[in-house]
Image (spheres, rainbow, N blue to C red):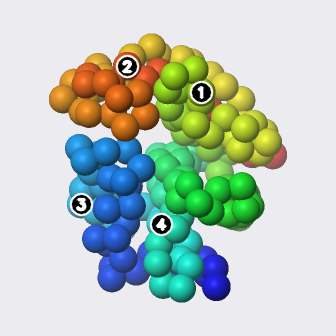
Amino acid sequence: MINYIDYRDKYKDALKIFQQRQWGENSDSDEIFDDINNYIIKLVLNDDVLIGTIIYHKINEKVVYLDMVVIDKQYQKMGIGSKLLGDLIIYAKDNNISIIETKAIEAKGHINSKKLLENYGFVQGETINGYWGKLYPDFNCLECGCCPCICNMHEYFKVII
């Protein structure tokens, strides 16, 4: 049975492993957990096993930043990401947020969350080629298979009306 819950500390290790499984051993959530009170973390569980998450935080009173939305591959295309993103938009409206910002990875010509973001009215902004490799030169990327990572970064934003 799929459940959507607020973050609970008992899932901290599972969340770290979940993220590393998606992006590689060098990816780390420590900066989020070091400042946990400033992040909103929603978890998706199937029979108490973590299958998805959305993490976001306020940049200021009018802007929220979507840090990640990740759904286990076997649970994709089931509406889970859509529900999480829809809930974020409701949160933004309820809290008088004007803009949601995020970044999406492009690996091997494919932007990982492009369709989901565009379905919810996000607009693509700036693109920086090789962004992740420049930011993390020792990162072994699971998306492109390179070290340093050669994935491009695409900024996306949504204006909340």
Q: Cα distance, mark 2 to mark 1?
A: 13 Å
Residue tagged by mark 1? 110
Q: Farthest residue to the left: give it.
A: 138
Q: Cα distance, mark 4 to mark 2?
A: 28 Å
Element class at badge 2: loop
Q: Amino acid at mark 2?
A: Ile
Find residue 159 and report its image quarter. top right
Q: Residues within 10 Å of mark 1 (few under 14, many from 20)?
A: few
Residue tagged by mark 3? 34
Q: Nearer the viewer, residue 50 or 128?
A: 50
Of badges 3 and 2, the one in the foreground is 2
N-terminal label among 3 and 1: 3
Element class at badge 4: strand
N-terminal label among 4 and 1: 4
Left or right of residue 47, residue 36 in this image:
left
Q: Amino acid at mark 1?
A: His
Of badges 4 and 2, the one in the foreground is 2
Q: Going 33% across and 82% down the picture, which residue do you hit?
A: 10
Q: Amino acid at mark 4?
A: Ile
Q: Going 52% across and 46% down the picture, which residue do you hit?
A: 65
N-terminal label among 3 and 2: 3
Q: Amino acid at mark 3?
A: Asp
